[in-house]
Amino acid sequence: MLGRLLLGLVLGGAGGVVAFLIQEPLIDHQKALFDPAAAVQQTVWLSIILGACYGFSLGMVDSLTRGLPGQALRKGAVAVLIGLPGATIALFMGNFVYGTLSSLLGNQMGTGAPPTPLGFLTDILPRTIGWTLLGTGIGAAVGAVTGSAKRWWHSVIGGMIGGALGGIAFEIFTIIFAPLYLAMSGGERVEVGAPGRAVGFPVLGASIGFFIALVQEALKAAWVRVILGRNEGKEYPVDKPVCIIGRDEYADIPLFGDMHIAPQHARIVRQQNRHLLEDLGSPAGTLLNGQPVQQAWLKDGDLIQIGSMRLQFFEKATRSLVREAMERIEQPSSRPPLPDYLCPYCGERKDPVTGQCACSVLPGASAPAAIASGAPSTALPSSTGIAVQPVTGTVPTRLVVLSGAKAGAVFLLQGDVLTIGREPGRDVQIDFDPTVSRRHARLKRQDGQWVLIDEGSRNGSFVNGQPVQQRAIQVGDVLRFGNTEMRVE
C-alpha cells in the first residue's frame, strides 16, 4: 500500500511540474485576460498539456505497482489519448462553472482586480469547484486504462479530491504573491496566476495520484497477496468480474519466475458477492489450502498455490464469518473432546486413584510404552483447554503437527539441527501458514537434549503457550509457530 501511495504521489507531482514548465512559456495568460478568443485558445492548449502530462505520469502507476514497466509505458500512452479529450472537456466545464459562480458572487479577482479578503473568499469557492471538475476528468482518464469499473470509480473519486486540493493551493499562493505582481505593474491589471500554477499543478497531480491509491485501498473488497515467490508481499486487487492468474504480463495477477506456471493458469470469477477459483486446465494444476482443485469457492485467508508461488486471498465479505467460525470451532468435528477420565496423550483410561495411565512415567521407569512403541497419539491442541503437562524421562524423537494446514504430519528429530520455517529447504517446512516466517526457528541438539531457538521470527516461537527465544524441550511439550502447533513425542 505504501509503495503505491508514494508512487502515485511522486509521479503525479512530477507530471504537474512538467506541465507547468511546458505551458508557462508557451501560453500568454496576460492576453487571455482581455481577449476572449485568446482565452479559448489558452484553454485548448492548456488542456492538451495537462491531459498529456497527467495522463502519462498517472497512467503508469497501476502497471508499475504490478512490476510491469513495459506495460506501464503502453498504458501511459493510452492514458494520454484518453486524457486529452477528458482534460479538455473538464477544463472548459471548470472555466464555465468558475466564471458563472464568480459573477453570481460578485468576484472580481478572476478578472485581474487587486486581491482583498472578501475577494479571496468569493474566489476560492468557484476556483475549487472548477479545479475539482478538472481533477475529475483527469481521474476518469487514468481509471479508464485499468480496465476495471470499480477502479474507474475509485480514480474519479481520487481525482475529485486531488482537484479540490490543487485549486485551494492555487488560490492560496495566488493571493500571497498577487500584491508583489501588482506593485511591479504599477497598479495596472495584470495576470497573477504564475505562482499559483507553479504550486497548484504539482499539488493537483500529486494529490490525484495519492488519493486514487488511498481510495482504492480503502474501498477494495477482495485482493490477493504473494506470500512466497517472486514479488513476495505484493498485492493485487480482485476487482473485475474475471481476474486471470498466470505468467502473462497482461494477466490481472501476473506471476513470473516459474516456467511451470501457464500464461493463463487459473482465474478468480466474481459471482454476486463471492469469488470462485477455477483452474484453466494447467499442466501443473492449482492447489487451494494444499488440495488440488478444479473449481472451489474462496474465503478470506485461503491459500492458493500456483506452481512454486503461493498467494493468500483476502475478502472483506467473508472475513467476519471466518473469524467467527474460528472462534466458535476449537477443534475438528471429527475429533470430539475427550472425557476427563481419558488421557489426552495416549487415549487410555486413567487410574481413578493415582490419575496415571499407560504413558505415565513412574520413578526409575524407562520410556512410556505408548511412545516407545510408536503408537499413535490422540493428543489435542492446547486450544482445547486441556492443560498440557510435560512428560519427562525420555528423549524426544519426533514432532507431531496438531493444528494448521499440515495437521497430522510427523517430523522425525534426526541429526544435530532441524530448521523450521516457510521457505523451501527447511527440515520442517510449514509452507501453508503465512504467519510462519520464512526462517522461523531451529531445533539444536545440545548435551543430549533438544533446544528450541527462535531465529528472529515476526510472530515468535512458543512452548506450552509461553514465548521463548531459547529453551530446552521435552516429551509432552506443545510448540507453536504462527498458527501451527506441534507436540513433542
Image: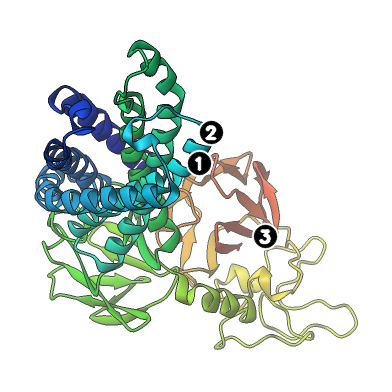
- The residue sitting at 53% across, 60% down in the picture is 398
Q: Amino acid at mark 3?
A: Asp
Which residue carries the number 3 mark?
477
CA distance separating discs 2 and 3 = 75 Å
Q: Amino acid at mark 2?
A: Pro
CA distance separating discs 1 and 3 = 72 Å
Q: Amino acid at mark 1?
A: Leu
* Of the pair 127 and 78, the residue shown nearer to us: 127
* Of the pair 146 and 276, the residue shown nearer to us: 146
* Of the pair 305 and 362, the residue shown nearer to us: 305
Q: Is residue 7 visible?
A: no
Total count of labels? 3
CA distance separating discs 2 and 1 = 6 Å
Query: Which secondary structure lies at badge 1?
Result: helix
- Label 1 neighbour load within 10 Å: few <14, some 14-19, many 20+: few
> Pointers 1 and 3 in contact (CB under 8 A)?
no
Query: Which secondary structure lies at badge 3?
Result: loop
* 13 horizontally vs 24: left or right: right
Horizontal and vertical percent position of residue 360: 75, 71
Which residue carries the number 1 mark?
121
> Pointers 2 and 3 in contact (CB under 8 A)?
no
* Of the pair 436 and 348, the residue shown nearer to us: 436
Horizontal and vertical percent position of residue 353: 90, 82
> Pointers 2 and 1 in contact (CB under 8 A)?
yes
- Label 3 neighbour load within 10 Å: few <14, some 14-19, many 20+: many
Query: Which secondary structure lies at badge 2?
Result: helix
Which residue carries the number 2 mark?
117
- The residue sitting at 42% across, 42% down in the picture is 107
- Label 2 neighbour load within 10 Å: few <14, some 14-19, many 20+: few
Image height of 131 relative to 222, above or below = above
- The residue sitting at 22% across, 41% down in the picture is 54
Horizontal and vertical percent position of residue 384: 69, 76
